[in-house]
Each structure stands twice: as C-alpha cells, then as structure tokens.
Image: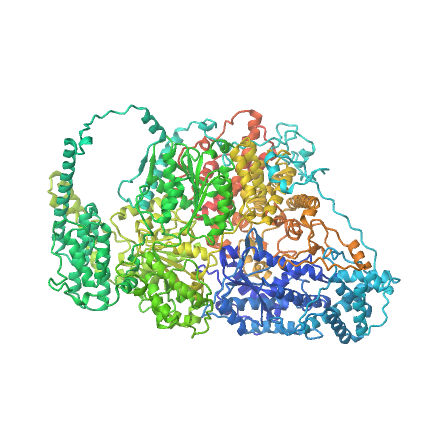
C-alpha cells in the first residue's frame, strides 16, 4: 500500500491527461514519461537487489539489455562509426565479467531473450556498419552464452509468449533486470532512437503490469558483495490492468513495426529470432567449410560491390585467429587513408558481417572475428608483395586459405595496390609509472610483505595549485604567513612548496571529536581535570537526572513486569568489598558435637526443626482455610463472573503454594464439568472439543505443579477415565502421595463405583487420544527440549541453553542462531552477571543495531543488576548523540557499533581501556550483511581483543558465517562454539486476509461488531501451490498441521500403503505417553521426508499429480473459490484503506490483539493510523448524536456539574464534622466524579484498560511527550488515547512502553520494531507490499508474534498483499551473510593513528593484524585478500602524498578533519582538498554573506547527502509539469568551477598514484601473475594453439602488439594500453590477478562528474539546497521526489554533518589560538566541558538524538561570531570561513527545527 500517492494510478492519469486521438512517436514518448514513467521512477527504491531484496530467490536478466550494456561500453572497439573494428573477444570478456560479478555475489538468475526487446541492441537507423556489427555481435554473444554451463539462457517471443508464461509459473522469478532505454538526446542514437526508447518503455510497462518487479541493469552498481540498483515494484491490479490510451498504444506498435522493417537485412536474418536451443542434429563444426559459405554468401548477395582481395584477407585472418594468443591480438587502430576507410566502412565490412551472420544462423555456428588483426594482416600483405602466402602464413594456413579461394573462384590476388592506402603508425607514449613514496612501518611492513613493491626513483608529487582571491588577505589556510595576525590554520599547497616545518606537525588524538575542550581519557586514567560546574549547570544536571531516573525506572518496570512494584535487582557486591571481608576475623560459633558421634539431632536442632514444622503446618492450615472461604464465595458465581474471580485469585501469592495451586485447578475442573453437563448441547462435538481441551489443560497443570493428595489423584484419574485417557493415568497422575487431607469441596462424581466406568458417556472423546492431542492440544504441549534444573539460572534450561552456559563459563566465543521466542535473552544477562561478579574493572560491551534497542537493554540491565562501585555506575550508554553515565568508567557499556569502533580505534583508550574488555555481545549480528553499516560490524569483530557472543534469529547459511567467525576468534586465542537451535517456542500460524470479499456490515462499534471471518488459515503446505521446488529449513508444522497433512496424504493416496500405515499417528507415537513438542517435531520430519521426493518432481500445472491433490485438500475452501488472478492482484489504496477498520476489528473480536501492523514506509504507517483513528472518531460522533443512552448520561453529568456548589458547601461542612467511613464512600462513589466526556468510549477504542495504568498516568505520559522536542503531532496524541500508535525511526518514543503495558494494542511500525525491541504481540500483520519486505525482514517481523512467556501461539496475517507474494515470502530462503570491504583509506590513517598514539601497544598491533589477515572478504578467497592488500598499499601512498602521514606512518595535523568525517569518505577527503586549495575561503570571502552561505551550502550538497534522480525526472516535460510549479529547483546546480578544477586535479593525482602502484606491482610480480589469457567465467584459455611451423605474420603480430602490465589483455584487444582515463577504468579493466576494489578508492569522479551527461544515468538532487532556500517539506516530496517518511532523516544527517564541520573548524581555530596564547580561552563555554555522568540531553529522549544538538544550537545562537570575537592568532580569512559556516548552519538548523516544531 502507498497512501502517500507516490504510486501511479494509470487509469486516473489517462483520464486526466487525455492525449489527442493520434500522436507521433516523440509525443507518445513524452506522454508516457511525464504521465507514468517519471512518477513511477520516484517510487523506485535504491537497494541491494540480492542481499536486501531477492535473497536466494530467482530473477531474470534480460539478455538484450545485457548485450546492450556490453556493446555500449565506450572502451569496446565494435560498431563505432569512426573505427573499423570488430573486437568480439573483448565483448565476450566484458560479458563474462558482468556475469561473474553476479555469480560471485550468489545471485540466482536466468538470462532471458525476448525477441520483441531486441531494438536497443540492433540500433536500426544508424550507419550500416554499426547495425551490421551489432547484429552479428548479438548472434555471437548469444552463442557464447549458450556454451556456458554455469548460465541458463532462454528465448521467448514476448511477454505474452505461452512458453514465457509457463516459465514464470514454473520458476517464479522475483523481478527482471532490464534497461529502460534511457532518455532521448539530440543527435544521439540515430533517427529511430525515439522508436527504440518507446518500444522499451512499452515493454517495461507490460512487464510491471504482468506482476513482475523491474530493476534497471544499466547503472547497476557492483559494490563489495552487493548489487545495487533501483527496484520498481509491480502494481498489478484488477481495476487498472491498464493500458495506455489508444493513440499512445498505436504509436508504440507503429514504432515497433518501423524498427522491424529497418532491421531487415539482405538475408532476412535480423528479423529471425534467436534460436531457443542449439540443434543436436548439426554436423561437427568445420571452419573451412563455414568460411567458404561466408564467401559464397558475400559474393552472391553483393555481386556488384564485392572486393575479392579484402574477402581473401578476411578468410585468412579468421583461420589465423585460432593460433594467435590474446596477447598478440592487443592492437591499436591501423591508420588508414580516407579511400580505404570509406571502402571498408561503407561497403566491405557491413557486407561481410551481414554474410557472416547469415551463415552463423544457417549453420548454428560461431566464428571468431578480429578486424584489427584483419587490417594488420592486410597491411602486411600489401607491404610485402615479394613474399609468398606460404612464407607469410605458414604452410598449413596458406593451404587452407588457398583451398577456400579456389572453391570460391577468386581471381588472382594482388595486395600491393593497397599499400598506399595505409598511413604511418602513430607514435604512442609508453606510460611512465609514478613511483611509490618511501614508507616503512614495522607493523604494516609485515602485513604488506605479500605485495611489497619497490620505491626507488621517487618522483615528487604534483601538488595542487591553490585558488587565489582578490582579497588583500591570503585565502589559504597557510602556516607560512609571516604575520601572526593573519596566520592560517591549515597548510595549503603553497605552504608545502615553501617547505615549512610547521606544516607537518604530528597529530595528537587526545581530545573528544565533538568537543575539543575535553580530553578522551577521564582524570582517573590520566586525562585533564574536569572544570567545576556552575550553579546553573548543577541545577540543570539535577533536573535531568531526576527525569532520567523516572523514565528509566518506568521503562524497566514495563520490561520486567514489575509495574507498581519494587524492582527485584540482583545485588552484586564489589570484589573489593569481598576481599576486605576475607581479612576480618570471623566470629567463632561454639556448637556441641555430640550429634556428630551419635547421628542424632541435638536438642537445639530438634527444637528448631519442630518450630519450622509448626510454622509450615500453620501456614498450610491458614492457606487451606483461606482457600475454603474462597470456594464458598465462588459457589455463588457463574460464567464470566467466575472467570474474572479465578483470574484475580490466580494472581494472589497464596496460590503459588503447591497445595493451593493444585486444589484450585481441581476446583476449576469441577466447575467446568458441571458447566458441561448443564450446557444446552453437552453431547455435541463442539462442546466435547471445548471442555475436553480445557480439562486436559488443567490436568497437565496439576501434573506440572507436582503436588497431589489422594483425593486430588482420584479426581484427576476420574477425569482421565471419563475423557477416554485411561492409558495416560500413570504418566499424568502424580503418584506416591500419602496425604489424606480432604478437598475443600466435593468433587463431581464421574466414575461408577462398582463398574469403574464413566457416568457420562458423551464426555468420551470420539477419536484416538493421540489424534485428539494432535488436533486440539498442540499449542499446549510441553515445549521443553531435554530441560533440566541448573543452579546457574532460575529456570530449567534446555540442552542447547546449557551448552551456551558452559561456553560462557569457559570464556569461549559464541555464535548463537536461534529463532525468536526460543530463549536467547538470558545469554546476554548471564554473561553480564559473570563479568560483574568476576572483578570490578572487567568490561562487557553490548552492541545493538538501533538506539531504541540500546535504551531498552540499558533499562533491563538497570532492572536486573545493582553493584556498588564506590560512586561509579556498573553500566553506561554511549551513542553518537548522547551518553548516560561514564562509558569509560563502567563495567557494562551498551552502545551502537559505530561508537565501539571509534573507541577501539582510540589511541588513549588502547592503552588503558581496551585491554580491560572481557566480552563483546553483538545482538542481531545478521546486521553485518546489510548494505549500510555492515562494514562497521565486521571491523568490531576483527578489532575486539576479547571473545565475542553473536546472537541472531535470522542468519542464512549460518555454518558458512560461523567458519569465518571461528577463524577470527581462534586467531585471537579464544575457543569458539556454534550453537544452532532451529525450533521456536511458540508456533506461528499464518492467515491471509481475504480483502477481495466485501464485509457484510458497516462498522458501528466494537460491542456490536461480529467478525467478518475473512481471516483465512494458510496451511504451510498449501503454499506449495506456487510451484516451489524445496522446503525452507524454517517451514514448520504445528501438531494440527501435521495431522491435516497426514489425512490429506491418506485421502489422496499420495504415498505407498506401507508408508501411510507407518505415518498413522496411532502407530507412529507410543500410546500411554502424553505427547510433547519434540515428539511432534519428530513426526513432522518423518512427513517431510516423504514430501521432499514428491516436491522435486512437482508440476503445479498438473492438477492430477499426487502433491497437487494433497495441496488442494489442504487449501482453505473460501480462498479456493477466489480466482487466482484476483488473489494475485494488488488491492488499490481505496480498498486497502476502507478495509483497515474491519481488519483491526476482526482481530479484536477474535482476541488476537495486541498486534503490530508492519509497513515499510514511515508515511504509510502514519496514514494508516490516522485513517483508523478517523473512522473511530467519525463513528463515535455518529453514535453520540443518535444514542439515547449517551444523551441520558450526558444529562446526568450536566446535572452533576450544576450541583458543584452544593457539593462544595457539603465538603466544607464535612471538614467541620467528622463523617463516618460509609458516608465518605457514598460521597466519592458517584460515577460523574471520574467521568470524562471527551475521552474515547470503549466501543470506539482499541486501548487496553488496566488498573495498573490509570487514565491519570496516561495524561502524564502524553503531557511529557508534548513537552519534548520535537513533540508528536496532535493526531498522534489522539491516536494514543484510542490505543493506536505509530513506531518508526522518527517517531518511537514511549510507544513500545505503552504497548508492553497493554494500553496500546494497535501499533503501526516499520522494520525498526523488529530489531529485538521488546514488544510482545499476539499477531504480526503485514500491510501491503514493499521491496524492503525481504525474506530476512519477513522473519524478523513475523517473529514478534507469540513471544515466549506471553502466548503459546503467534499469528501472522497478510493484508493487502498478492497471494503470490505471500507464497514467496513464506517459502523464501534467508540469504547468506555477505561480506563488506572493511577498510577505507580513512580507516588506514586511523589505524596508523591507533598504533602511534598507543605507542604500538600489544592490543593495537594485534587489532591491526587481525583486520588485514582475517576479513570476511578474504576468507577462502585469495582474490579478496589481495584486493585488500592492494588497497592498503595504495592508500598509504595516497595518504603520504596528501600529507596525512609521514614516511613512518605518523599522522599529521590534517588527520583530524579526515578522521572526524570518516563515515563520509571520499567527501571528507574532498573537503580536505578544498580547504587546502583555498576554494572554501574564496566562497566565504564574498562580501555578500547571504550569497556566501548559499554557495557554501551548494558546495556541501555536492559533497554530502548526495541523492540521484532517475533520468526521466530530468526531462524537460517533467520539469515543466512539476518543477516550474514548485519553489524547488530539483536539479542541483553544477559544482563551482574552481572547486571542480581542484577536485579534478586531485582525481588525476589519485589516478596517477593508483596507476603507478598497479604498474609497479604488475611489473615486479609479472612472473607470479602469469599470462592474462583466461576468460573470467568460463575459464577458457585464449592463448592460441601452438604451431610448430614458422610464420612471418605471427612473428609480425607478436612484435607489433600492445604490451600491457596493468590492463587486461582482453581490453587491450580494443587498443587500450596502460593509460587509464579514470579510477573506474583502472579498477574495472585491470588484468587478472591485479584485484582492485573500485569503490574503496577515494575517487572524486562521482563528485566532479557532470550530471546527466556523457552516459551518466542519474542527475543530482538539489533537495538540501532547496530546503535551505525555502524550508518546505511538501515541496521536497512533490518536486524533489523525496518520500515524506525519508525527509526528516535526510535533513537530520546533513544537519549533523554541518555541525561536525563547524565543530572541526572551531577546534582547528581554537588550537591555533591556544598555540598562540598558550592558555585556555577566556570565553570558553564551560557547559560544553561538563560530563555530568548522565545524559547530556533530556534523558527521556533516549530514542531521539536531536534534543542535545538542538539545545546546544540554541545556546550557541546567542553567541556572536563577529570579527571582535576572533581568537588571537587566527587570520581574518580563516575567521570569515568560520563565520559563514556557522551562519549557514544556524539558518539550515532553524528551518529544520521549524519543520517539526
């Protein structure tokens, strides 16, 4: 669902636009793009299409789009009008390289060619040479794909091809990767470009309308182990299976017809489709015969325009190619005179290529063609006429060629006349590599030994010239200035040329990043003394602490169920106090020893035991008397009143006594039996099921209590005999009791005294007891798995939990993978308690992926543990935005991964804090595989100096991930254990909400509402109707599911009779033993073993197949009546919204609330909550207007209000005269006193009402939320009062606590609530589809239902999703965790800083070694290992030349800027370059402050927060329609020329450095690397066959070939040497063995590239600059295509970036000032120096990081940044930069603050 109207309603768009009755192709394209494609592009999501979307699911790569990407490569010399070349071997290499990129990322795909989709490959309308070249290349590349064993290639006519439809049903591809055709550019693409794009748009529309999603292939980004692209969701709906208007459709079909006519070749071959499969009846390939056929085709088809000499050379070169290596085929273009060039391009080459294609089609063959070799042979033959063909070609080749010439009857060949048509060869410069700068470091030298390269002959780096300004003062931050007044802080390029020593000051990383006035180390570890607080600061801290402790306590109470009670903390004494106690002389207690010798109790002991016995006897007597009185009260109660009384009674502590608890349950049996006997239809099956289930649950509870008397045993026995469970008496009746005490009541007689038979025969179950248990008792079965008592924990742990306890006791590393509700929670807290008890300084780190989870875990730690550490807290919180307690002075630190990574890389902490780490717990460890942030998790695992505990419920292929983790831990000296437990404690029952069936009634209120019964059960095996080939490992069967499956197998005779007998429950299970969950699991596995063979051969289209009949038997009857096309359609917004009230009311009526309603768009969550609340408010208003009861009540209330004065007088009299208690109660019992007419009525509210959460407390909580900044909107508060809440990353405070309290029972949430947040729910509901609803996210969200300790069963409901999507989700497999590249250039310099700053501490050295020796990317992959080492060595040279490191690896002064913005690389390094060059100074030096600020923000928008627009959104039509009506400019103006020039120069230097390294390494290790002649995917060797005979032409080709070192020989085939145009060019075309990671190189190419030009697909979005200018959120959504749910986060990120930049600049300026004055500035802000020990923001803002930032901004607002405040020693130009940055930040921040104020 998309309530924000981002998706396109094509029917409405057609109706609104109404194109003319006829239109041209251009008009049709413009209409499609403006009406449909551009808006649809807005809804596309950029994501990892494998890791975050498809997982292991299959998808399709459009074959023609794949070939288009290959053939459009600008480096490929093929089909270029200015180059007579046809380098097919380069094209094949590119094709395999792309496919290898998919394969190495575990993509599951097929390649599909649609004949209707061929036009972008063929390019009709362009030159004859281009069309002929691309047509032949298409055939050859297709033939090559067919030859690949690892790739499945298929062909279909179109999307309506029946074979394609069958393929879709069989394979269920999740999406199709296809090119969109791009945009129409003037002069590009030929005269039929618009026809080609139009045909492609129509194909994409039909694809999406057919129910498949689409992702553009062109522009896909292969990064680390991820494949990133935009995902266009399919929006198939019955209501708008729309088609374009007739005029547009006619233009599309006409365009296809035009293209088909233009693509027709002289042989008719282009129009013929690609063959589906290679024919098996063709004779073996004969090269000479094929060449003869090519010659004949050429001569016969072009009789009037044939060139025999060129035909002969073409034949010769093809014969030669089989013996020529790819190295000798690396050739530059042969210079030609115009006559020969024209002849080749206009005549011979198009004709011979057409003829070759015709033969290839006819013979289903393939040929190797290389026109560069052809021209080289032609030139050699023309320049050596005296030599014979045998001498030139060799005997064998010459004979084959002459035989073909003879058969073709070619005339005498004379090549000498062509010699004058060749020009002299051009002179080419051999690239001189940039030698590496000298470098040595004892730690890194060892790591780099495998890629050690020479550094002799150093060439000085090319420095960037600074930008000068017209201002009098220097515009660089230059240390070399002679004036103290104008001295600049940052060294510029100019200063480096002066070789000042001041520039290269070693950097000392001892201050906090965001507050340079504070040292990293606290005073007790050697840091500076904290400045005393002012009175105002002390008062502020006190108020903050008080609010914080209240919020902490409240949250802890909701987490532990201690609402209104005292928290039961474990008091852990400090180790120091225990040590002191050991030194105190113990008090001696003298005891008599007579009992030891006699074995009898002493008199004192006997008296003590007698006293204890008396107390116990009295207590039992009191309890019995108390319970007897309760029995008397209950005897007068019936129905719901009795149930309520029993519920209250169960909460009384007395019922925890075993005797009382057992008797209470026996009494409940007694009352149930009486109720059954006197029910209207006691012998009905419904009554029997209801009462037998309730009675057997009580029997099981009595057995679990373990207490019995003779009467209790007799009562339970009689129940079992009556129900027909006589065989279970021995296993379910507690035996051995000699207690003769009588029951407090007379149990109903069930068994006849004489015959011992049942009195009531109708009570006996009518089926085998085992079948009854499977059918009804599944969710109440014993769930333990070999559980045993263990003194280490308060519960009976299962076997796998005891394994975990043992591992922690042995200080082992752990990876625990167990589903939600399995019981993982205790692991973390057991480890924490162990650390707290072991010492007073050992540290445990708990890592959570979100701040909300950090806050929750901290609250639970507070609730569980208390330890006196002499003023220190035993726990702390630390995130990027706030701290609670001292993170460095606690024992348990709860934090997010980014903070721990910073701390582990801190030099001061490496010496004092890091060695104290004892355990690191990584909760939700599967987050390591995510696109964003995954690298940080991996860094933590590699840097941690202690064992780790990884916890997750959702890890695909966990064994593989565990192998790597175990290798890391063993390298650190820690034993490792992997615990994988696959079973949930509570089952998940799945339902499909049949939104296609209209509800019977309109919602009028909850009390009169009856369920629509549209929530239909989905049997797990019924989902196999989608055509699945395997069962996911986590697809489980409940007991009833297993029984239903057996019955279906039996009914359909799907198995052999002997198998069915063995699977009969009565046979499979042993009778007499009450079933447990582990028994059902064993039965489930037996059933699956018989299903798997049926599934492997299952054809979902064959309704008569055994499995098809079984599935049909298991399907819901109601859903079976709904046509598949309806079930698989996407409901539209109106239907989805209008049915929402019925969905929630159904859940309420069925007792299935609380529920979490998951939607993966924040705005959708908000819209659904508002819509639901609006319906309730409207219905309540209608009820109040029409209800006589309400009017009567309001009249009474009004009368009560009118009597207020009388009550006041009465109260005054009462104060004078003492009233008795009865009068007081009568006075306060009037209902009007607590009546609140404006509150929602219970009939129109989903709120849960509990005495533990009164309305007054709700008012306080809402008032508290209102006080916070940002406060929630008014509609959200109204929703809260009706028990409805929204939870997403921007709105998450307090909602989960209210949900746990039971007040909020309906919560709309994104996936943030699925990441470990304690929000136990009965039901998880998926509302609508989304690309982010992946296999992983589905399991995370569904797992919230049925949490352990709350429900025995969880429910999952699919609402407004196509059934096909539901089936895919349930049957999907979790993707394995992908690796991220863990090292960036900024991280490299931070590692050097770690080593230097910690004096090469053992901890720091070991961390660096693990990081480079054990990353996941290099685990069992030499390619990944060398990729990492190459990047490291390049980074060192880059950092040396950027003057961030010296030659020993010591960080220099500018390190601070790069390090503080490490997460923005390469933008942080670009900012360094711009500061060096003076560009930022020039921008800020403008006299007009407003213009300076705007230009600065524009520059920052190019560096940070970059977002791209799809190409369709940059078209003039879209701009005219949307942009010009908006205050937004949408397209970001170009980067300022001066800045662009500086960054381009930097980019050139980066390229020089990288190229120099690649050439140096390639040369030095040439022998080790070997020859580069292996294709990447097929591994075919293209080294040429060995020929014994001599050949002049082969010698010539060998001598004249391009020699490359770093470039791939296959790319060199198109004439490219070791000159590279860009970093991307180098990384993507490097030779085999030289593994370079493009995305880890700090390239500025993405920043300097011009938008939407030179093949760039996406333009840069101006949303940041637009917001700075107009501050309008609505404009960002409407024009900038920013989803409303994303706006807040994007703006917040940029706001924090600006604050960081400002802070860094302030720190640099302050440092200069301090250096000048050698004292602390007088105007230092003391408030920033205080670390209160508690949160530095309002503590209730745990889940919100804004307040501290906003508060500090507010404090700064009053500060002046005028020139009079300029610190001493800071130049005017530097101060001007700070002024502009500060003012720009203030203005942006004020608008951002106003957005939610």
Quick check: 1061 above or below 1679?
A: below
Quick check: 1314 above or below 380?
A: above
The part of the image, by quadrant, that contains residue 364 is: bottom right
Query: Is residue 1743 in sight in this rendering?
Result: no
- In percent of width and height, residue 1233 lies at 20, 49
Q: Residue furthest front?
A: 597
Q: How many marks?
A: 0
The residue that appears at 66% across and 66% down in the rendered structure is 138
Left or right for 361, reference 625: right
Left or right for 232, reference 84: left
Placement of the N terminus among the 4 image quadrants: bottom left
The residue that appears at 46% across and 71% down in the rendered structure is 1099
Check the image and tell me how it is coloured: rainbow
Closer-to-camera residue (172/1727)? 172
Left or right for 644, reference 896: left
Closer-to-camera residue (1103/1076)? 1076
Left or right for 86, reference 1285: right
- In percent of width and height, residue 457 lies at 73, 37
- In percent of width and height, residue 1676 lies at 51, 53
Closer-to-camera residue (117/1771)? 117
The part of the image, by quadrant, that contains residue 508 is: top right
Quick check: 543 above or below 280?
A: above
Query: Is residue 19 in sight in this rendering?
Result: yes
The part of the image, by quadrant, that contains residue 1711 is: top right
- In percent of width and height, residue 665 lies at 19, 54
């Amino acid at each position: 669902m998309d309530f924000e109207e981002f998706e396109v309603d094509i029917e409405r768009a057609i109706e609104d636009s109404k194109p003319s009755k006829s239109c041209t192709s251009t008009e049709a394209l413009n209409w499609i793009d403006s009406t449909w494609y551009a808006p649809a592009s807005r809804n596309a999501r950029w994501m990892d299409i494998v890791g975050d979307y498809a997982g292991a699911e299959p998808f399709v790569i459009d074959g023609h789009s794949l070939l288009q990407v290959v053939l459009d490569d600008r480096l490929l010399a093929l089909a270029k009008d200015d180059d007579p070349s046809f380098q097919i071997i380069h094209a094949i290499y590119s094709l395999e390289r792309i496919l290898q990129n998919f394969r190495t990322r575990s993509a599951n795909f097929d390649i599909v060619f649609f004949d209707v989709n061929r036009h972008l490959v063929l390019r009709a309308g362009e030159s004859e040479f281009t069309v002929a070249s691309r047509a032949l290349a298409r055939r050859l590349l297709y033939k090559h794909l067919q030859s690949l064993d690892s790739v499945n290639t298929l062909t279909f006519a179109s999307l309506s091809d029946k074979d394609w439809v069958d393929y879709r049903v069989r394979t269920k591809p999740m999406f199709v990767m296809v090119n969109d055709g791009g945009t129409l550019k003037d002069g590009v693409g030929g005269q039929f470009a618009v026809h080609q794009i139009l045909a492609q748009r129509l194909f994409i529309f039909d694809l999406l309308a057919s129910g498949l999603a689409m992702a553009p292939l062109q522009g896909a980004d292969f990064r680390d182990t991820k494949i990133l692209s935009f995902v266009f969701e399919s929006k198939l709906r019955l209501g708008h299976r729309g088609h374009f208007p007739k005029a547009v459709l006619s233009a599309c079909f006409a365009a296809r017809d035009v293209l088909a006519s233009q693509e027709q070749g002289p042989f008719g071959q282009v129009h013929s489709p690609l063959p589906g499969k290679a024919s098996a009846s063709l004779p073996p390939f004969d090269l000479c015969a094929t060449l003869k056929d090519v010659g004949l085709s050429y001569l016969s088809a072009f009789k009037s325009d044939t060139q025999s000499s060129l035909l002969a050379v073409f034949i010769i070169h093809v014969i030669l190619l089989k013996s020529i290596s790819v190295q000798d085929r690396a050739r530059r273009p042969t210079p030609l005179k115009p006559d020969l060039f024209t002849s080749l391009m206009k005549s011979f080459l198009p004709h011979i290529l057409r003829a070759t294609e015709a033969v290839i089609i006819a013979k289903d063959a393939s040929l190797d063609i290389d026109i560069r070799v052809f021209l080289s042979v032609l030139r050699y033959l023309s320049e050596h006429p005296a030599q014979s063909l045998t001498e030139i070609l060799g005997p064998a080749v010459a004979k084959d060629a002459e035989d073909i010439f003879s058969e073709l009857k070619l005339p005498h060949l004379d090549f000498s006349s062509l010699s004058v048509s060749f020009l002299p060869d051009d002179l080419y410069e051999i690239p001189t590599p940039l030698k590496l700068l000298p470098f040595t470091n004892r730690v890194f030298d060892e790591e780099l030994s495998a890629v050690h390269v020479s550094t002799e002959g150093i060439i000085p780096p090319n420095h960037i010239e600074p930008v000068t300004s017209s201002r009098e003062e220097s515009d660089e931050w230059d240390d070399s200035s002679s004036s103290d007044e104008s001295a600049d802080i940052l060294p510029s390029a100019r200063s480096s040329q002066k070789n000042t020593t001041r520039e290269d000051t070693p950097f000392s990383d001892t201050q906090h990043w965001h507050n340079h006035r504070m040292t990293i180390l606290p005073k007790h570890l050697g840091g500076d003394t904290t400045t005393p607080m002012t009175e105002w600061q002390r008062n502020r801290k006190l108020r903050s602490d008080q609010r914080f402790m209240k919020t902490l306590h409240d949250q802890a109470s909701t987490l532990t169920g201690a609402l209104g009670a005292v928290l039961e903390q474990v008091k852990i004494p400090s180790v120091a106090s225990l040590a002191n106690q050991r030194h105190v002389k113990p008090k001696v207690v003298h005891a008599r020893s007579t009992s030891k010798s006699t074995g009898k109790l002493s008199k004192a002991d006997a008296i003590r035991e007698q006293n204890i016995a008396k107390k116990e006897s009295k207590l039992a007597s009191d309890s019995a008397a108390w319970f007897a009185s309760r029995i008397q009260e209950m005897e007068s109660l019936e129905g719901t009143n009795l149930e309520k009384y029993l519920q209250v009674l169960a909460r009384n502590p007395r019922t925890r006594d075993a005797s009382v608890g057992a008797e209470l349950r026996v009494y409940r049996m007694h009352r149930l039996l009486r109720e059954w006997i006197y029910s209207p239809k006691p012998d009905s099956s419904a009554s029997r099921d209801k009462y037998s289930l309730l009675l057997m649950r009580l029997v099981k509870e009595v057995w679990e209590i373990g207490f019995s008397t003779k009467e209790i045993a007799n009562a339970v026995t009689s129940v079992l005999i009556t129900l027909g469970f006589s065989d279970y008496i021995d296993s379910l009746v507690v035996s051995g009791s000699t207690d003769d005490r009588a029951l407090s009541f007379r149990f109903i007689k069930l068994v006849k005294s004489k015959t011992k038979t049942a009195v009531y025969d109708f009570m006996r179950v009518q089926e085998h007891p085992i079948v009854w248990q499977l059918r009804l008792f599944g969710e109440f079965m014993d769930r333990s798995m070999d559980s045993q008592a263990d003194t280490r924990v308060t519960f009976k742990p299962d076997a796998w939990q005891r394994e975990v306890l043992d591992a922690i006791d042995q200080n082992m590393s752990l990876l625990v993978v167990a589903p939600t509700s399995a019981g993982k929670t205790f692991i973390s807290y057991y480890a924490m308690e162990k650390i707290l008890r072991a010492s007073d300084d050992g540290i445990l780190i708990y890592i959570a992926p979100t701040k909300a989870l950090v806050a929750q875990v901290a609250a639970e730690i507070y609730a569980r543990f208390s330890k006196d550490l002499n003023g220190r807290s035993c726990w702390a919180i630390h995130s990027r935005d706030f701290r609670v307690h001292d993170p460095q002075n606690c024992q348990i630190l709860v934090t997010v991964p980014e903070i721990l990574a910073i701390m582990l890389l801190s030099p001061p902490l490496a010496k004092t804090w890091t060695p104290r780490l004892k355990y690191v717990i990584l909760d939700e460890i599967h987050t390591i595989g995510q696109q964003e942030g995954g690298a940080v998790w991996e860094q933590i695992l590699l840097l941690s100096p202690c064992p780790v505990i990884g916890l997750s419920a959702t890890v695909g292929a966990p064994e593989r991930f565990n192998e790597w983790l175990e290798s890391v831990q063993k390298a650190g000296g820690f034993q490792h254990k992997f615990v994988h437990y696959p079973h949930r404690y509570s089952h998940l029952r799945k339902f499909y909400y049949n939104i296609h069936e209209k509800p019977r009634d309109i919602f009028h209120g909850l009390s009169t509402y009856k369920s629509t019964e549209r929530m239909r059960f989905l049997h797990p095996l019924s989902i196999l109707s989608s055509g699945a080939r395997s069962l996911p490992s986590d697809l489980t069967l409940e007991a009833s599911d297993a029984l239903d499956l057996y019955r279906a197998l039996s009914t359909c005779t799907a198995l052999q009779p002997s198998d069915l007998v063995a699977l009969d429950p009565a046979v499979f299970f042993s009778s007499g033993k009450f079933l447990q969950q582990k028994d059902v699991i064993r039965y489930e596995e037996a059933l699956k073993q018989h299903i798997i063979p049926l599934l492997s051969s299952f054809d979902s289209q064959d309704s008569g197949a055994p499995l098809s009949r079984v599935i049909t038997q298991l399907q819901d009857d109601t859903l079976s009546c709904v046509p598949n096309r309806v079930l698989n359609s996407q409901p539209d917004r109106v239907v989805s919204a209008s049915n929402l009230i019925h969905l929630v009311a159904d859940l309420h009526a069925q007792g299935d609330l609380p529920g979490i309603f998951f939607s993966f768009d924040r705005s959708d969550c908000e819209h659904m909550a508002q819509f639901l609340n609006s319906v309730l408010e409207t219905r309540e208003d209608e009820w109040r207007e029409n209800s006589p009861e309400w009017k009567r009540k309001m009249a009474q209330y009004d009368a009560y209000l009118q009597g207020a004065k009388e009550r006041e007088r009465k109260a005054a009299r009462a104060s004078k005269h003492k009233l008795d208690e009865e009068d007081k109660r009568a006075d306060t019992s009037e209902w009007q006193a607590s009546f609140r007419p404006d509150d929602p009525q219970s009939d129109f509210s989903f709120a849960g009402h509990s005495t533990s959460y009164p309305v007054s407390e709700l008012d306080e909580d809402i008032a508290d939320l209102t006080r916070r900044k940002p406060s929630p909107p008014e509609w959200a508060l109204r929703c809260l009062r009706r028990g409805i809440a929204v939870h997403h990353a921007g709105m998450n405070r307090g909602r989960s606590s209210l949900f746990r309290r039971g007040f909020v029972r309906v919560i709309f949430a994104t996936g943030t609530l699925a990441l470990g947040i304690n929000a136990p729910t009965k039901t998880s509901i998926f509302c609508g589809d989304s690309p982010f609803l992946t296999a992983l996210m589905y399991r995370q969200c569904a797992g919230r239902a049925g949490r352990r300790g709350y429900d025995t069963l969880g429910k999952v409901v699919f609402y407004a999703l196509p059934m096909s999507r539901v089936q895919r989700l349930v049957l999907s497999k979790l993707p394995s965790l992908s690796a991220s590249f863990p090292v960036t250039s900024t991280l490299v310099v931070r590692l050097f800083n770690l080593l230097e700053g910690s004096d090469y501490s053992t901890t720091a050295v070991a961390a660096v070694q693990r990081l480079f020796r054990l990353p996941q990317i290099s685990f069992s992959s030499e390619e990944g290992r060398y990729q990492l080492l190459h990047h490291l060595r390049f980074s060192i040279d880059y950092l040396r030349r950027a003057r961030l490191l010296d030659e020993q690896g010591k960080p220099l002064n500018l390190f601070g800027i790069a390090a503080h913005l490490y997460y923005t690389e390469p933008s942080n390094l670009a900012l360094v370059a711009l500061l060096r060059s003076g560009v930022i100074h020039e921008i800020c030096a403008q006299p007009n402050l407003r213009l300076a600020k705007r230009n600065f923000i524009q520059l920052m928008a190019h560096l940070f927060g970059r977002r791209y627009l799809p190409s369709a959104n940059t078209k003039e039509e879209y701009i005219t329609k949307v942009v010009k009506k908006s205050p937004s400019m949408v397209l970001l103006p170009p980067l300022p020329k001066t800045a662009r020039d500086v960054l381009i120069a930097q980019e050139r230097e980066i390229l020089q450095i990288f190229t120099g390294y690649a050439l140096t390494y390639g040369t030095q290790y040439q022998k080790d690397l070997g020859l580069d002649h292996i294709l990447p995917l097929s591994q075919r060797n293209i080294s040429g066959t060995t020929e014994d005979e001599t050949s002049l032409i082969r010698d010539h080709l060998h001598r004249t070939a391009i020699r490359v070192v770093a470039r791939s020989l296959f790319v060199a085939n198109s004439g490219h040497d070791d000159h590279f145009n860009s970093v991307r060019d180098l990384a993507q075309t490097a030779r085999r063995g030289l593994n370079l990671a493009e995305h880890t190189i700090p390239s500025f190419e993405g920043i300097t590239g011009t938008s939407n030009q030179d093949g760039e697909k996406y333009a840069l979005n101006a949303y940041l600059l637009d917001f700075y200018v107009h501050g309008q959120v609505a404009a960002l959504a409407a024009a900038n295509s920013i989803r409303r749910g994303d706006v807040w986060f994007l703006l917040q990120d940029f706001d924090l970036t600006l604050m960081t930049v400002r802070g860094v600049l302030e720190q640099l300026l302050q440092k200069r000032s301090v250096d000048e004055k050698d004292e602390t500035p007088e105007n230092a802000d003391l408030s920033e120096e205080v670390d209160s020990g508690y949160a530095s923001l309002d503590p209730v803002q745990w889940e919100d990081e804004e307040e501290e930032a906003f508060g500090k901004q507010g404090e700064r607002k009053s500060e002046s940044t005028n020139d009079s405040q300029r610190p001493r020693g800071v130049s005017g130009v530097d101060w001007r930069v700070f002024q502009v940055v500060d003012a720009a930040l203030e203005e942006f921040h004020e608008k951002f603050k106003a957005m939610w104020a």
